[in-house]
Image (cartoon, rainbow, N blue to C red):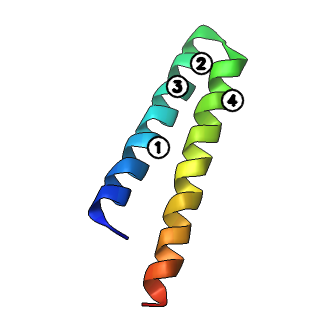
Amino acid sequence: MGLDDKIKNAAQEATGKAKEAVGDATDNERLQAEGHADRTEANLKQAGENVKDAFK
């Protein structure tokens, strides 16, 4: 996994956590769902990169 991919995934996960936190604080289910989706997508990308790295 390249450093830029790690940074992008970490940023996406942080954004997702922030959206979820704001959604929780404001009781906004749409924002909570968006945050959860962002975090899930970042984790899946990271897992895919880890698999690629394992086969190098």
Which quadrant of the figure has residue 20? top right
Q: Sequence order check: which comes first, mark 3 or mark 4?
A: 3
- The residue to which callout 3 is attached is 19
Name the N-terminal-most of marks 1 and 4: 1
Residue identified by numbered label 2: 23
Q: Is mark 2 on a helix, strand or loop?
A: helix
How dense is the environment of label 2, judged by Cα within 10 Å: few (below 14), some, or many (20 and up)?
some
On the picture, is 53 further left or further right than 25? left
Dot 3 crowding, Cα within 10 Å, few <14, some 14–19, many 20+: many
Mark 1 and mark 4 residues within 8 Å of each other at the beta carbon: no
> Would you place residue 36 above or below residue 21 in this image?
below
Residue 29, given in percent of the width and then of the height, sits at 71, 19
Residue located beneath label 4 in the image = 33
Mark 2 or 1, closer to the camera: 1
- Label 1: element kind: helix
Q: Do labels 2 and 4 touch, CB within 8 Å?
A: yes
**C-alpha span from label 1 to label 3:** 10 Å
Q: Do the residues labelled 1 and 3 touch (CB within 8 Å)?
A: no
Relative depth, front residue between 26 and 9: 9
At label 4, counting other C-alpha atoms closer than 10 Å, the crowd grade (few under 14, some 14-19, many 20 or more) is: some
Q: Residue at x 70, y 20 (%)?
A: 30
Q: How far apart are marks 1 and 4 (CA)?
A: 13 Å
Which residue is at a point 55% across and 69% down the rendered structure image?
A: 48
Dot 1: few (<14), some (14–19), or many (≥20) neighbours within 10 Å? Answer: many
Q: Which of marks 2 and 4 is nearer the N terminus?
A: 2
- Do tag 3 and tag 2 residues touch (Cβ < 8 Å)? yes
Q: Is mark 4 on a helix, strand or loop?
A: helix
